[in-house]
Image (cartoon, coloured by chain):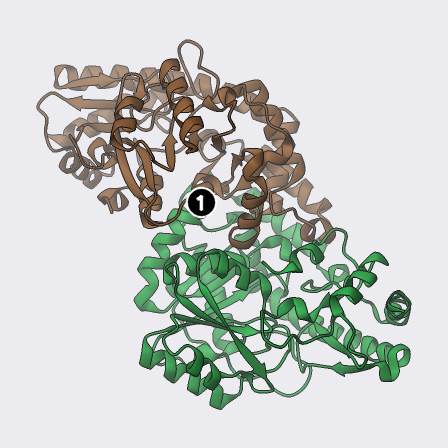
Chain colours: A brown, B green
Amino acid sequence: MARWHEFVRPKPVRPFQMGLPALDEFPRKLWARLVARKARGLSAIAMVSQDPAGYAPLRQAISGYLAIARGVRCPTDQVLITAGYQGAVGLFARTLLSVGNTVWFENPGYFRARDALALAGAEIVPVPVDQDGLDVGIAIRRSPRARLAVVTPSHQCPLGVMLSLPRRLELLAWAAKTGAWIIEDDYDGEFRYHGRPLPALKSLDDAGRVFYAGSFSKVLSPGLRLGYLVVPSSELERFQRVAELFAPSPSLLDQMVVADFMIEGHFARHVKRMRKLYAERRKALISALRIFFGDEIVLDVPLGGMHVIARFVAREDDVAMAARAQSAGLAPLALSLCTAGGSRQSGLLLSFTNIPVEAAEREVRRLHRSLR
Amino acid sequence: MARWHEFVRPKPVRPFQMGLPALDEFPRKLWARLVARKARGLSAIAMVSQDPAGYAPLRQAISGYLAIARGVRCPTDQVLITAGYQGAVGLFARTLLSVGNTVWFENPGYFRARDALALAGAEIVPVPVDQDGLDVGIAIRRSPRARLAVVTPSHQCPLGVMLSLPRRLELLAWAAKTGAWIIEDDYDGEFRYHGRPLPALKSLDDAGRVFYAGSFSKVLSPGLRLGYLVVPSSELERFQRVAELFAPSPSLLDQMVVADFMIEGHFARHVKRMRKLYAERRKALISALRIFFGDEIVLDVPLGGMHVIARFVAREDDVAMAARAQSAGLAPLALSLCTAGGSRQSGLLLSFTNIPVEAAEREVRRLHRSLR
């Protein structure tokens, strides 16, 4: 197990902390109103007659959203509601993998999913990521018969690069040829500040090899622990069965409220508002980092997402740096904790979502001071 | 996989349907009020700073409840909130079992858990159940080195017998000696209509081999999918880690509302009220069954729980009978679907929880007619 665990405990929320939406901008009052309304109308019958795959109107709303926003066309019954992304990982680990199966995993990559798959008995094959995303050629050479590839094509976690179109086609062709599965974790797919995003990898999946995973954790709130998995029709029955036996669908009330939130248009408005807010906070953070750190860092600014990466020219131990910042009450994450073997990239991952524009200089000054 | 699956889909709720509390008596208004209150006060910070083991005040309330009601003493940190009992099964299947491990399982027994464990790669050893519960002697002879025993000591599922004290001690001694684990599924532990229940098996667990699983599904509502698992301290860290990676704790809002429901005394009152109601409904159902079926059946009436068992003297195929009743819009469950190999017991499981006293004769008449 990697050491990320001791660094990411979320209480209380601290400046630069990764993986959180802007907590000060969560539409609390609207949310409470929707919850109260649903709770009043909630019948006992509705509560027991739940489909293990999830609340149908929510699945339908997600299906509609994916068609418009991500170019993914899927009938409602292929959308399974999960307990966030980790719930989806639990589901596909149980369904697609046997002990000893090999899994391509981006390196650096999302540690929680990587550790979960390793704990489930998978043999993780770390695959380097360059400017075009996961290096499919290297992966094929290292492990041509892998059972599964887990990728973040829209916005690689944590580097923020996009999987290029040629790589996407190469990956899909490999899966179609070998019968491997692909998990597309559409991490941070909603937030992009320059140019147009590519549609989801799933939109090109003619052979039916791609599972598409989305989550409301970063768009609405991680406290909901609501996500979804689009399952190829060939695997649907198996997944529904495993969901029913091991991980029945999450809270009906939460699902109902998110469904209303989407159907009544609040979701689209909220994403749009957050995109604007994050663009401002991102800009303010970048500007403050340049002021205080100047030539000490090379700033890696992805086109989307919720964080930037500061790479230190002096190439210090980033885990030690993160620990120093942590002692000062800040929560940058060391990039090297996201890597598994091979050449460790070093740097600090800095989220801007919870740093208001007017606080950027103050927090960056604190960071700079803590690292000296 | 057994064929229970096609018989237990819950929509809409039909007479005699198993595993449901009285839906007409769920305290909807009170519930909606508690939900609305919590939703108004719910801060974004609270939503993100969740402990993967669950909402602390709920865990504390459960710990207090278990001490009083079930004789189980456990510190709050040993209580993990799960997605109902199936969520607990997912957790211990991932944590305690490797593919090929043997598991003692009551026969007849709770099919969902049995199928889940089989699907997780366990080798199920069906163990006969007699008037004293699971026959520990037979189990030890058949599979002395089993890794796990899954039992329902308070009220065996589905026969309703209680695991006797000598058997409890024999089971605990075996686990302590061999290093095996015991899952105590305290199924229907809350409802008992005659005599005093034994304390939970867990209360005798000096060697720390017993996991105690409880659920709010049958006491409050299966729609909540909230349960809990008391984890021996030696295994706590591992369970918390697996919970975080595969099955983060369920909806915070639901957990908060159940916590309030317990802390404010509604829970104890509700259980007491349901116990009285179920005693009445049970009596009415038994009386109606005797009127319409007379000598055709031998009635098996457990001291507790939410159903009775009608065994037909003519020994017909109970699955065929259940199917006939199902065509008439009724939902008895065939006892033989709960058995795995060995001599199949035959009969119909009939829940009384959703049959009001005044409807008992009418529904039993329908049942009788459907079976002719």
Task: Inspect this view and state whether residue B354 appears.
Answer: no
Front residue of B235 and B113: B113
In the picture, measured across the screen, residue A48 lies left or right of residue A166, that is right
- Please identify the quarter of the rendering in which residue B330 is found: bottom right
**Quarter of the image containing the C terminus of chain B?**
bottom right
- Please identify the quarter of the rendering in which residue B342 is found: bottom right
Q: Residue furthest bottom?
A: B166
Residue B35: x and y in percent read 61, 49
| In the depicted structure, whether residue B236 falls above or below residue B64 | above
Residue neighbourhood size for the residue with mark 1, other residues' Cα within 10 Å, grouped as few (<14), some (14–19), many (≥20)? some
Name the residue located 54 percent from the left edge and 35 percent from the top edge: A231
Q: Which residue is mark 1?
A: B46
Chain at numbered mark 1 = B
Tag 1's secondary structure? Answer: helix
Residue B186: x and y in percent read 54, 72
**Quarter of the image containing the N terminus of chain B?**
bottom right
In the picture, measured across the screen, residue A350 lies left or right of residue B156, that is left
Front residue of B69 and A59: A59
Q: Identity of the amino acid at label 1?
A: Ala
Residue A331: x and y in percent read 26, 36
